[in-house]
């Protein structure tokens, strides 16, 4: 059951400062597991989260702007929003192309007109805020999407292997600590589906990805990639990350 105290709480950032270049640096020069993990996010565009030319897309929690830039490079018109001013400064300075804009703002204060977007992304973000903020975000995304528009979300799967990964990383890695410092709401497939349907969405896809593949990257990137492609064919219930495609009726 949801903690009633969380209904009154509002999270405006992580408990520790996150470098604005964090996601981009993790993608291009992080350790192999981290690089593969962030590459797998980009691979979603070729698998679950397709982008069409001239799509109007909202990227909530854009971070360093990597995913926003990838979508804009495919011809989409993208607005990336993040609460971290350092991330917005970095993204604005690093990624500049027509149809790509970055805005500093909180995910529960999205200042766009209704029915502005064809698609909305929120990748590994909702675990960083409290349940009431997630509900507000999803309600706002429903309003901001055009009828028939889709919301794409990912978040760690706390009924899978993820808690083991989180515990290990927090104790043996130098990257930003996840438990409590970053992650305050813990989703599983059933809870994520409930949040989405309560907001009015039709859940079209709800599955896992990024299970074993990233951890093979230090041995062989090619092997990790082959494993990722195999994992796409089997929805492992214990997978590390949940991925959802949710449609606004219409």
Image (spheres, helix red, strand yellow):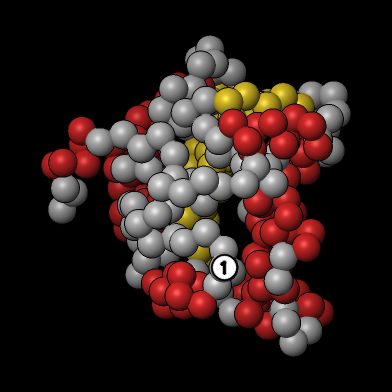
Q: Is residue 95 above or below residue 177?
A: above
Residue 7 shown left or right of residue 247 in the figure: left
* Quarter location, residue 227: bottom right
* Residue at x-position 79% and y-position 32%: 93
* x then y, percent, for residue 10: 31, 34
Residue 59 shown left or right of residue 222 in the figure: left
* Quarter location, residue 102: top right
Q: Is residue 193 above or below residue 68?
A: below
Write down the residue under mark 1.
174
* x then y, percent, for residue 100: 76, 27
Residue placed most toward the observer, 141 or 91: 91
* Residue at x-position 63% and y-position 36%: 86
Which residue is the extreme one toward the top?
113
* Residue at x-position 35% and y-position 57%: 180
* x then y, percent, for residue 43: 72, 58
Q: Is residue 179 above or below residue 216?
A: above
Residue placed most toward the observer, 147 or 5: 5
Q: Is residue 194 above or below residue 168?
A: above
Q: Secondary structure at mark 1?
A: loop
- Residue 203 appears in view: no
Residue 48 shown left or right of residue 176 in the figure: right
* x then y, percent, for residue 85: 59, 31
């Amino acid at each position: 059951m949801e903690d009633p105290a969380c209904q009154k709480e509002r999270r405006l950032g992580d408990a520790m400062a996150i470098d604005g270049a964090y996601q981009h640096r993790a993608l291009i020069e992080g350790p192999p597991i981290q690089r593969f993990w962030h590459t797998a996010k980009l691979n979603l565009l070729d698998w679950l989260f397709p982008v069409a030319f001239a799509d109007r897309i909202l990227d909530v929690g854009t971070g360093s702007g990597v995913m926003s830039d990838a979508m804009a490079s495919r011809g989409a018109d993208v607005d990336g929003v993040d609460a971290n001013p350092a991330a917005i400064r970095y993204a604005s300075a690093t990624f500049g192309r027509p149809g790509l804009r970055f805005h500093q703002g909180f995910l529960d204060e999205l200042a766009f007109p209704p029915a502005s977007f064809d698609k909305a992304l929120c990748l590994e973000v909702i675990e960083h805020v409290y349940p009431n903020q997630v509900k507000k975000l999803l309600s706002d995304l429903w309003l901001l999407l055009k009828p028939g528009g889709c919301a794409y979300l990912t978040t760690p799967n706390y009924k899978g292997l993820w808690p083991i990964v989180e515990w290990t990383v927090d104790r043996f890695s130098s990257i930003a600590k996840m438990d409590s410092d970053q992650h305050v709401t813990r989703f599983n497939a059933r809870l994520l589906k409930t949040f989405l349907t309560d907001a009015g969405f039709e859940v079209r896809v709800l599955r896992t990805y990024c299970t074993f593949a990233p951890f093979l990257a230090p041995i062989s990137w090619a092997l990790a990639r082959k494993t990722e492609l195999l994992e796409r064919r089997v929805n492992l219930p214990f997978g590390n990350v949940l991925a959802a495609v949710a449609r606004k009726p219409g």
